[in-house]
Amino acid sequence: MTLEVDRNVDAGSIAAPFVTTVMQIEPAWIDYNGHLNMAYYNVLFDRSIDQMWLDLGIGPDYLKTRGGSTFTAECHVRYLREVHLGDPVQVHVYLIAADEKRIHTFEELRHAEEGWLSATSENMTMHVDMGVRKVAPFPPDIRARIERVAEAHRAAPRPEGIGRSIAMPSKRAEAVR
């Protein structure tokens, strides 16, 4: 999937969650266990963010015309249910928070027809001035678009799993099982 131009859709129209187009699992992405290899979950999540960034006006055209882009600073993926070759998938993206230089997103990879949750990805993205390759504030017009979307998404129920960290289960929690 190549995204070549920004659609520059009014970002105020992005409902919570932003739902991507349906994507297909590619044969080369299936590992020896017969399911989607963990690396390709990130490919699907990255493609979903690319779709949302187009609507925010920070896609490839933004880089070409204004010299800005985004880099992922942190990512936490949870694998909850296998997906297989032939499974159509969509990603639901929630813009959790934003400030002058960062966007916090939470994505849910779902089976496009049956709706079940396969994986989640929580990310912190930084705005970068590509002329100096340093973190920099978003331009005011882009910042305003992002804030309109963040405001709309704050009204949506928060998806389960935001803010999770990796840790061994406590002895007490294991005893309950």
Image (spheres, rainbow, N blue to C red):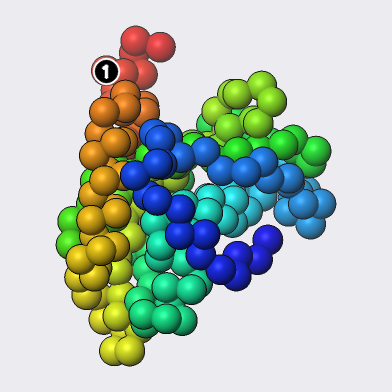
Determine whether, in the image, residue 29 is placed left or right of residue 45: right
Give above or below for 145 relative to 20.
below
Residue found farthest to the bottom:
131
Residue drawn at (37%, 49%), measured in percent from left and top? 11
Q: Residues within 10 Å of mark 1 (few under 14, many from 20)?
A: few
Q: Quadrant of residue 117?
A: top right
Residue placed under numbered mark 1 in the picture: 172
Q: Looking at numbered disc 1 in the image, what kind of residue is underneath it?
A: Arg
Q: Quadrant of residue 159?
A: top left
Residue drawn at (26%, 46%), measured in percent from left and top? 148
Q: Nearer the viewer, residue 144 or 168?
A: 144
Determine whether, in the image, residue 161 is placed left or right of residue 91: left
The picture places residue 56, in percent across and down from the top left corner, at 39, 56
Residue drawn at (30%, 80%), measured in percent from left and top? 129
If the image is split into quadrants, where does the N terminus sit? Answer: bottom right
Determine whether, in the image, residue 80 is placed left or right of residue 95: right
The picture places residue 46, in percent across and down from the top left corner, at 52, 56
Residue drawn at (34%, 10%), measured in percent from left and top? 176
Q: Nearer the viewer, residue 100 or 75?
A: 100
Q: Quadrant of residue 21?
A: top right
Residue found farthest to the top:
176
Give above or below for 170 relative to 53.
above
Q: Nearer the viewer, residue 93 or 25?
A: 93
